[in-house]
Amino acid sequence: MLKLKNYTTIKDTVQETVIKRSRFIAYAYNLKDEEDAEEKIVFLRKKHYDATHVCYAYISDEEGRRGRYSDDGEPSGTAGQPMFDALKKSAELHSPVRVLDERSSRVTRLSEKLDALARSRVEGADGSFRMLCARLEGVNPLAVLSHGYAMVQGSDGRVLSTAADATVGEIVDISLSDGKLRAQITEITEM
């Protein structure tokens, strides 16, 4: 598993709120390790020596799986546990490993979509290409010749399409589906 050390995290901050004449002070710290967390807790207990409760929660790994919390005399599960759960959820959402996994999954999904789109476009183009080839084959002079027709060209290369285009004694080339013939016109009969 890839371990990342540099990523965006919280900055040290303090927030104070009074509810029904009770004072609540929340501290958020960017901690290095569990020892750093324990030192902060000792510091805060000394700083707020007159506080009835010093509840805390911290995450001690980058993936948000390990940590500690304390209700410090509050009813069980009413202070430290909810803070820990909120931190854990936040750590899971912002874990660099999770972000990389999500982005990797997104790249994979986009790659699969792009592959399917490209395949679809190629198949569509192949169908269009085949249709155009069939149409082209239908007007191909060689295809017409294969049905028993012939193309006659005068000695100057012009195509003779009527009997009036030819002259007696002219040498002509006759193209058939499988080759050419050379002939001399000896007689012209019009229909």
Image (cartoon, rainbow, N blue to C red):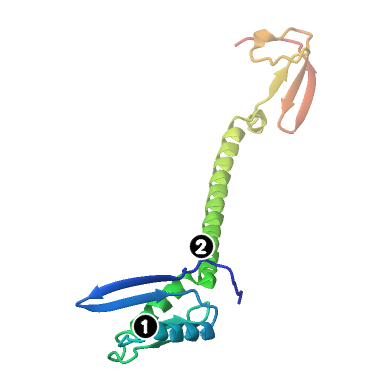
Q: Residue at x 65, y 30 (%)?
A: 148
* CB contact under 8 Å: marks 1 and 2: no
State the residue in front, 155 or 38.
38
Q: Amino acid at mark 1?
A: His
In the rendered structure, find residue 48 and report the number of the disc placed on it: 1
**Residue 60 left/right relative to 153:** left
Q: Residue at x 40, y 82 (%)?
A: 47
**Could you tell which of marks 1 and 2 lies nearer the N-terminus?**
1
Q: Amino acid at mark 2?
A: Arg
State the residue in front, 133 or 157.
133
Whether residue 66 is visible, yes or no, is no
**Residue 187 left/right relative to 40:** right
Q: Extreme left residue here?
A: 20
Q: Is residue 173 above or below residue 31?
A: above
Query: Which dot, 1 or 2, sits closer to the camera?
Result: 1
- CA neighbours of label 1 inside 10 A, class few (<14), some (14 to 19), many (20+): few
Gap between marks 1 and 2 measured at Cα: 47 Å
- Residue under label 2, please give it: 106
